[in-house]
Amino acid sequence: MVAATVAVLAFLWWLLIFFAWVIFIFFTITIARSKGRSGLLWGILACFFPLITIIVLLLIPARTRN
């Protein structure tokens, strides 16, 4: 009984982490596109470094279109 409960809780934690990871990637792509940057490139970077990528994107200036 206890082992099954622990297994379910572990699964739920991994599911929560996965959804948070997907949300970080979505926000990263949205921020990148709004700043005129490549959403695909920044999305791939966010797969490996989610929070760092968002911080860097928020700090870099928007690309101006000439």
Image (cartoon, rainbow, N blue to C red):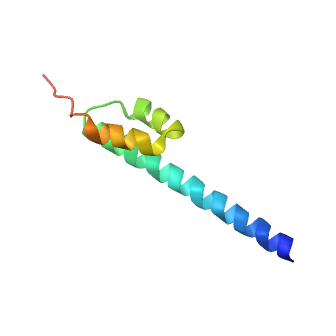
Q: Indicate the quadrant where residue 53 lies.
A: top left
Q: Is residue 1 above or below residue 10?
A: below
Q: Indicate the quadrant where residue 38 lies.
A: top left
Number of numbered discs present? 0
Left or right: residue 50 compared with residue 16: left
Give how far across and how far down residue 60 sits, in percent. Answer: 26, 34
Point out the residue furthest to the bottom here. Answer: 1
Give how far across and how far down residue 4 sits, in percent. Answer: 83, 71
Instruction: Name the residue nearer the viewer: 9 or 23.
Output: 9
Left or right: residue 7 compared with residue 23: right
Q: Indicate the quadrant where residue 11 lies.
A: bottom right
The structure residue drawn at horizontal position 41% and vertical position 34%, both measured from the top left corner, is 42
Q: Is residue 7 above or below residue 66?
A: below
Left or right: residue 51 compared with residue 12: left
Instruction: Name the residue nearer the viewer: 16 or 65.
Output: 16
Q: In this view, does 10 lie above or below 18?
A: below
The structure residue drawn at horizontal position 72% and vertical position 63%, both measured from the top left corner, is 10
Point out the residue furthest to the top here. Answer: 66
Left or right: residue 59 compared with residue 13: left
The structure residue drawn at horizontal position 51% and vertical position 55%, both measured from the top left corner, is 20
Give how far across and how far down residue 35 sits, in percent. Answer: 25, 37
- Quarter holding the N terminus is bottom right
The structure residue drawn at horizontal position 42% and vertical position 29%, both measured from the top left corner, is 41
- Quarter holding the C terminus is top left
